[in-house]
């Protein structure tokens, strides 16, 4: 019988002859921007988890320098230190020297991928999920339909049996045994323009549906469309759109990420919108950086720059509009969990608070924890034990005052926190902030 776990272990053998050939031009300058002050240490969830310098931003940059200068060979142990980074960018937000850690890590991972020495699981996930399924959303939908049926029949529990799980890589059997909740009906894109609820449109917007979100959070996207309509927007959800490429880019799959960005630029700008809306913080932050991703493509740079300028997180867009005040009273105790890619990568923290302040009846708990929840895209699949420890800490803080609802603005965080709440049999629920806003609007009408 094939022992996958054994194969995975063998793939971790060190290769002392590898070099780091990062292919982004400013990389070699950026690694020297770090002055080793250590301000980033206490912001870094993996440093807080391990207490190790090698699992801190400063340590990871030191390793990038050492390998670039060829003082150290590119070993699998070094690759593992980089792989344990969540790409949460909390370090970037507090760094006084302006070290662009997110881009440096994307580039480093890209170089590791090109070297072919990433772990076998990372390789397989890159090849099958990032480079194939996310570019072929029809096939991804079909697979999620099958997963939905297995969930209804509770067949996913088979993967929790030791005899079955021992046949598969640990990451895969854990993921299949505890899959995210899949919607019965998926959210679909449309060639039609959706009219606003007001007589004349205030703005013409296009909405990113994304890759996984329409399959796991169709009701969130539905609420976004309805809230935009209530606020006088004409909404388009172009059929030609694809995945934004965030998962690929964060994992160093830059080539496929750029192809996805190009496809979206074409399909989103065609209708000359006033804004491009994302309800997913991870996607929005990547789309706001398309101009950096494509800066060496002179043919696309202007279009990419326009695309990035037009991109708004839905909370940011609604507050700028400004938002029509909802009147439906919701007697709920809530806490907002600001996703890393909203807070650190997009610097958005006031807007969600302003939305909550407008909803009548809420008892809002001030969140003191700005750390990552451990989801971080496919990190929760690739680095399960660290991801779970970080989630535990996060949940302990979020649940301290027993809220009815934890609110957030990113589907990855929703899946991660939902699974954490389920494992604790907690009565607290997780919801996208726009769904709560929509509830207030419809409570007002009924
Ligand atoms: S805060 Fe910035 S400059 Fe200081 S150690 Fe961290 S990355 Fe380096
Ligand atoms: S991105 Fe997050 S996990 Fe990675 S080094 Fe920075 S703070 Fe730590």
Image (cartoon, helix red, strand yellow):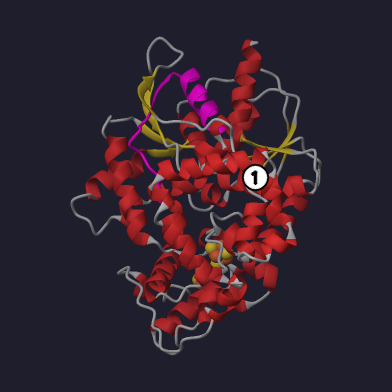
Residue 349: image location, x then y, percent: 57, 43
Residue 148: image location, x then y, percent: 59, 39
Q: Is residue 177 magenta?
A: no
Q: Is residue 364 left or right of residue 110?
A: right
* Residue 130 shows in this picture: yes
Q: Is residue 342 above or below residue 224?
A: below
Circle 1 Cα neighbour tier, 10 Å, few/some/many (<14 / 14–19 / ≥20): many
Q: Give the magenta range.
A: 220-245
Name the residue located 72 percent from the left edge and 56 percent from the top edge: 160
Residue 346: image location, x then y, percent: 48, 48
Q: Is residue 221 above or below residue 40?
A: above
Residue 218: image location, x then y, percent: 54, 32
Number of numbered discs visible in the structure rendering: 1
Camera-side residue of 169 and 223: 169
Name the residue located 30 percent from the left edge and 45 percent from the top edge: 263
Q: In which quadrant of the rendered image does the C terminus lie?
A: top right
Camera-side residue of 382 and 311: 382
* Residue 410 shows in this picture: no
Q: Secondary structure at mark 1?
A: loop
- Choose top left, top right, bottom left or bottom right for residue 24: bottom left
- Choose top left, top right, bottom left or bottom right for residue 50: bottom right
Task: Name the residue beneath numbered marker 1.
Answer: 337
Q: In which quadrant of the rendered image does the N terminus lie?
A: bottom right
- Choose top left, top right, bottom left or bottom right for residue 47: bottom right
């Amino acid at each position: 019988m094939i022992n996958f776990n054994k194969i995975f272990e063998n793939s971790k053998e060190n290769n002392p002859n590898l070099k780091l050939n990062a292919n982004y031009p400013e990389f070699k300058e950026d690694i020297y921007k770090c002055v080793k002050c250590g301000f980033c240490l206490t912001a870094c969830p993996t440093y807080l988890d391990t207490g190790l310098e090698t699992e801190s931003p400063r340590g990871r940059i030191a390793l990038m320098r050492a390998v670039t200068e060829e003082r150290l060979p590119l070993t699998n142990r070094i690759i593992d230190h980089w792989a344990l980074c969540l790409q949460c960018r909390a370090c970037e937000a507090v760094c006084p020297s302006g070290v662009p850690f997110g881009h440096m890590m994307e580039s480093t991972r890209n170089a590791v991928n090109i070297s072919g020495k990433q772990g076998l699981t990372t390789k397989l996930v890159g090849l099958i999920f990032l480079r194939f399924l996310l570019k072929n959303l029809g096939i991804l939908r079909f697979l999620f339909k099958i997963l939905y049926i297995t969930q209804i029949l509770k067949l996913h529990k088979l993967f929790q049996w030791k005899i079955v799980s021992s046949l598969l890589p640990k990451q895969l059997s854990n993921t299949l045994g505890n899959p995210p909740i899949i919607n019965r009906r998926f959210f679909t894109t449309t060639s039609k323009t959706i009219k606003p609820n007001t007589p004349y449109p205030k703005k013409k917007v296009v909405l990113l549906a994304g890759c996984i979100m329409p399959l796991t959070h169709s009701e969130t996207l539905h609420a976004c469309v309805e809230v935009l309509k209530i606020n006088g927007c004409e909404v388009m959800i172009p059929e030609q759109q694809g995945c934004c490429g965030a998962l690929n880019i964060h994992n160093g799959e830059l080539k496929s990420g750029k192809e996805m960005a190009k496809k979206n630029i074409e399909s989103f700008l065609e209708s000359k919108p006033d804004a491009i809306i994302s309800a997913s913080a991870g996607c929005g932050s990547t789309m706001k950086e398309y101009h950096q991703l494509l800066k060496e493509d002179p043919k696309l740079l202007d279009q990419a720059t326009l695309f990035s300028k037009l991109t708004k997180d839905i909370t940011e867009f609604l507050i700028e509009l400004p938002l029509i005040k909802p009147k439906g009273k919701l007697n709920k105790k809530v806490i907002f969990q600001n996703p890393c890619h909203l807070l650190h990568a997009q610097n958005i923290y006031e807007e969600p608070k302003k939305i909550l302040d407008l909803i009548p009846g809420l008892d809002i708990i001030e969140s003191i924890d700005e750390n990552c929840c451990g989801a971080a895209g496919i990190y929760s699949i690739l680095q399960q034990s660290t991801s779970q420890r970080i989630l535990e800490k996060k949940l302990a803080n979020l649940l301290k005052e027993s809220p009815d609802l934890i609110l957030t603005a990113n589907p990855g965080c929703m899946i991660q926190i939902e699974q954490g709440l389920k494992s604790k049999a907690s009565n607290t629920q997780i919801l996208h902030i726009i769904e709560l806003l929509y509830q207030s609007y419809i409570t007002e009408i009924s």
